[in-house]
Amino acid sequence: MVIGCVGFRATLLKMEEEYIKDVCAEIIKHKPDVVITEKGLSDLAMHFLTKAGISAIRRLRKTDNNRISRACGATIVHRAEGTLPDIML
């Protein structure tokens, strides 16, 4: 993607930062000890989670994620936005 206007690029970066901050705030609201992802986790998100005292593990295989979930009784959530399961509240 080519962005011609410097101001437009700065606006996009600000929007991305706000989105990541909002998603992290939704996760932090539930006070988990650990967040495990099967995909990547941005450095900015890692910063917000670490600042809140939450450890994060990224790029775990789905089978390992399921195994950890069963072993410790964790709930797998596919999206941070919206309603999280009542078990987490």
Image: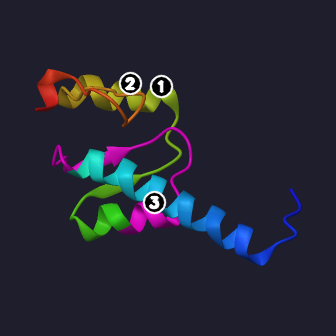
Horizontally, is 28 left or right of 11 in the view?
Answer: left
Q: Which residue is mark 3?
A: 18
Neighbourhood count class around disc 2 (C-alpha, 10 Å): few under 14, some 14–19, many 20 upward? some
Screen quadrant of the C terminus: top left
Three-letter residue code for mark 1: Thr
73 or 30, nearer to the observer: 30
On residue 63, the disc is 1
Residue at 39% from the left image edge and 58% from the top image edge? 21
On residue 66, the disc is 2
x, y percent for residue 78: 42, 28
| Mark 2–mark 1 CB contact (< 8 Å) | yes
Q: Which residues are magenta?
A: 29-47
Where disc 1 sits, the SS reads helix
Of marks 2 and 3, the one in the foreground: 3
Neighbourhood count class around disc 1 (C-alpha, 10 Å): few under 14, some 14–19, many 20 upward? few
Q: Pick out the residue farthest to the bottom.
A: 6
77 or 24, nearer to the observer: 24
Q: Alpha carbon of mark 2 to alpha carbon of mark 3: how far?
A: 30 Å
Residue 11 vs 76, above or below: the answer is below
x, y percent for residue 2: 89, 62
Neighbourhood count class around disc 3 (C-alpha, 10 Å): few under 14, some 14–19, many 20 upward? few
Three-letter residue code for mark 2: Asn
Q: Earlier in the sequence, mark 1 or mark 3?
A: 3
Magenta stretch encompasses residue 35: yes
Q: Earlier in the sequence, mark 2 or mark 3?
A: 3
Task: Say which quarter of the image contains residue 70.
Answer: top left
83 or 66, nearer to the observer: 83
Where disc 3 sits, the SS reads helix
Three-letter residue code for mark 3: Glu
Q: Alpha carbon of mark 2 to alpha carbon of mark 1: how far?
A: 5 Å
x, y percent for residue 19: 47, 53
x, y percent for residue 38: 51, 38
